Image: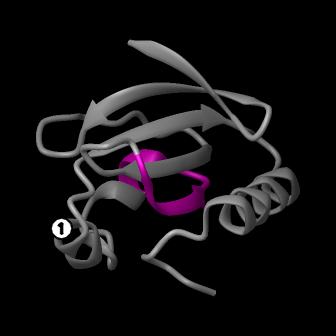
Amino acid sequence: MQEEIINGRAFNGPWSLDVAKFNPIPGIYIIVDTNNSVVDVGQTNNLQQRMANHERENCWGSNNGTRLWFTRIDSEMMRLIVEQQIRETYKPVCGVR
């Protein structure tokens, strides 16, 4: 496992979306492609449940999103703020708001 600083926060990963078993923890996830470009960003109260049958999986696949970086953030308010900041910085192709 590695640590990557993204928008001033330490993210752990990358984990392969194909084989990873995620823990039921709150935080921000970033889906990246094989070049480590951001494909999607999201926040969740439970990573394990969120990654099971995610509605944007097809978009990730279409854009070579194969790996996940994650940082734990317990506060929902803080997760929403950080998610929006990362979206504004990287403008991911999936989950555009």
Q: Residue at point 22% right, 45% down?
A: 17
Quarter occupied by residue 7: top right
Is 2 or 56 nearer to us in this picture?
A: 2
Q: Residue at point 38% right, 42% down?
A: 36
For the C terminus, the image quarter is: bottom right
Q: Where is residue 71 in the image (x, y as percent from the top left)?
A: 61, 33
Q: Where is residue 92 in the image (x, y as percent from the top left)?
A: 51, 69
Q: Which amino acid does label 1 sit on?
A: Gly
Quarter occupied by residue 23: top left
**Is 44 contained in the magenta span?**
yes
- Side of 64 where 54 appears, left or right: right
Tell me where the magenta segment starts and ends, as one range.
37-49
Q: In this view, does 95 lie above or below 48?
A: below
Residue labelled with disc 1: 61
Is 22 or 63 nearer to us in this picture?
A: 63
Q: Is residue 29 above or below residue 6?
A: below
Q: Residue at point 58% right, 57% down?
A: 44
Q: Residue at point 24% right, 44% down?
A: 34
